[in-house]
Amino acid sequence: MSLRTRIALTFVLLLAGVLAAAFLAVSAANRANAQREIDRQLAVGNHVFERALESNRRQLVQAAQVLAADDSGWNGFADFGQHVVGENRRDAVGIDGDKADCTGIVDAADTLDDARCR
C-alpha cells in the first residue's frame, strides 16, 4: 500500500471517528433537552389539571350549598317526587296547578309542538 493511500485511509478513519463522536454528543444533548421539555410540559399539564379539579370542586361545593339552602328543592328531592318543586315553579311563574298539566316543546314561533297532556 502506498503512502498516499495510507494517509487517505487514516484521514477518512479520523474523519469518521470525529463525525461519530459529534453525532453521539448531539444525540445525547437532544435526548437530554427532550427529556427536560417533556418533564416541564408534564408539570404544566399537572398544574392545569389540578387547577381545573379545584375549580370543579368549588363549583360542586357551591351548588351543594345552594341546594342545601333551598328548602323547597330539598323537600322535592327528599320526597322523590316533583310536586313540591313543580308547585314552587308554578307559583314563581304565576300558573294555576290545573293549567300546568300539559308539557311539550315550543318552537321559535312560540307554537306548541308535540304536546302531552295528562
Image: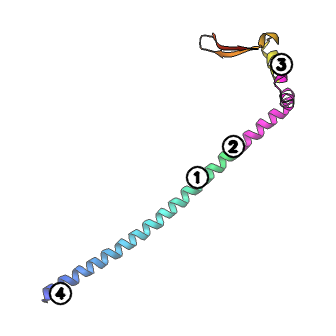
Q: Gap between marks 2 and 1, in whole Å?
A: 15 Å
Vertical position of residue 91 compared to residue 61: above or below: above
Badge 1 amino acid:
Gly
Disc 1 to disc 4, C-alpha distance: 58 Å
Query: Of callouts 1 and 4, which one flags the residue occurring earlier in the amino acid sequence?
Result: 4
Q: Mark 3: which amino acid? A: Glu
Relative image position of residue 31 (x, y in whole percent): 45, 66
User: Nearer the viewer's eye, disc 3 or disc 4?
Assistant: 3
Q: Dot 1, crowdedness within 10 Å: few (<14), some or many (≥20)?
A: few
Q: Is residue 22 left or right of residue 83?
A: left
User: Which residue, given by chain and number where applicable, does mark 2 sit on?
Assistant: 55
Quadrant (top left, top right, bottom left, bottom right) of the N terminus: bottom left
Q: Indicate yes or no whether the magenta region holds residue 69.
A: yes
User: What residue do we see at 83% from left, 20% from top?
Assistant: 88
Q: Which residue is mark 3?
A: 87
In terms of depth relative to the viewer, which is nearer, 13 or 117? Answer: 117
Which residue in the protein does label 1 denote? 45
The region drawn magenta spans 56-84
> To which residue does mark 4 refer?
6
Q: Which residue shows up at 74% across the image and 40% down it? A: 60
Please say if the residues under marks 3 and 1 sit with CB atoms less than 8 Å apart: no
Asked if residue 27 is positioned above or below residue 55 in the image, the reply reads below
Residue 61 x %, y %: 77, 40
Residue contact between numbered discs 2 and 1, judged by CB atoms under 8 Å: no
- Residue type, label 4: Arg
Could you tell me residue 80's position as x and y percent?
Answer: 84, 30
Instruction: Give the side of residue 95 with respect to residue 54, left or right.
Output: right
